[in-house]
Image: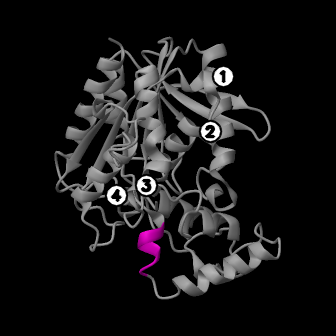
Amino acid sequence: MIAVRKQIYSNKLFTFRFSTRQIIRKIQKRTTSPTISAMVPLSPYGTFSGSIFQYNTFPSLVAFESSNLEKSPNKCILIGGLSDGLIPTPYSKDLESACHESGWSLVQPMISSSGLGFGHGTLQRDTEEIRNLLNYLVEHRNAEQIAFVGHSTGCQNAVHFMKYGDKDLRKKVKLVVLQAPVSDREGAMETPKYAENIEHARKLQAMGQEDEMMPRSAFWAPITAARFLSLQDVGGDDDFFSSDFSDEEMALRLKHLGQYGDLNGLKTLIAFSGEDEYVPTTVDKKKLVERLHMAMTSQTNPDVDSQSSPDTVDTLFLETGNHNLSNEEGDKELFVDTVKNLLKSALN
């Protein structure tokens, strides 16, 4: 999902002639202006200390691990949504504190899909890079147990990795937190040119040109036809959480989480906001959370023997929460406190 909507403006180039002295005066005036200084807040999501390291050489990819518990064998991986990078959420700093109090370090990776890279990316590429990250953490930073905290599209990354990622690495994952696991497609379907854009992307795909870019009017960021379809077409690779899926379709996409809970002790948390601005108002959010829980534990068909224990998946419904928990006081605190308790339980 979209963490922050962005508008791109075309730049116009103007030529001016200033003397060196005039330029220096203008720079001094701007840098000493109290008005300008007041407009630049101190890092709103917090400041962090720790180590940055390169876990992938080509492309060059880095991750940041918070200090205090860098040598801990327990690594919590925070993955943001579309356009996010380091420090992706308002609760990032609180989550760091919760991790340290629970015996975990917090790791924030940059992947090729970070920033605007998602527009030419795939979940398959993300999973491969997350695999490389976890391998590096195991080989060089003492990792033994892993937790994922996914925000928005980061939820898709966590779900996809737990289905298609390296089997040995998946066994190390003890907790998956899905904060704002919402459908990109359902919100897009309410826009005026949805059908037209989908048809255009499908035509490009049919001609073998799915890596070509969509028109600027189709999306708020540069995006290929392939990724556009993945996010916005029915049954696209990113389409995990849509409320219009049947129970069986939803279980097909999510039941592996409950199965891993039974096999390896994985715990999953669904954290959903009652005021999420990217969920259509026609969607019954509480009902959707119930159905997601049922799908993950395969409690959708009483005739199926492969049901998982309902205890492998917890839910947290934040009545007043918005998409990234930045709106109402207490929402991010309740969420982080819940995660902290699960991190502690994962070590028992």
State whether residue 109 appears in this view: no
Say whether marks 4 and 1 touch (CB < 8 Å).
no
- Residue 97, compared with residue 199, is above or below; it is above
271 left or right, relative to 173 = left
Query: What numbered label is drawn on residue 164?
Result: 2
Q: Determine the CA span between mark 2 and mark 3.
A: 20 Å
Mark 2: amino acid: Tyr
Q: Residues within 10 Å of mark 3 (few under 14, many from 20)?
A: some
Q: Residue at x 68, y 82 (%)?
A: 200
Say whether marks 2 and 1 touch (CB < 8 Å).
no
246 left or right, relative to 236 = left
State whether residue 345 appears in this view: yes
Residue annotated with mark 4? 38
Say whether marks 3 and 4 touch (CB < 8 Å).
no
Mark 1: amino acid: Tyr
The x, y position of residue 189, in whole percent, is: 46, 78
Secondary structure beneath dot 4 equals: helix
Residue annotated with mark 3? 248
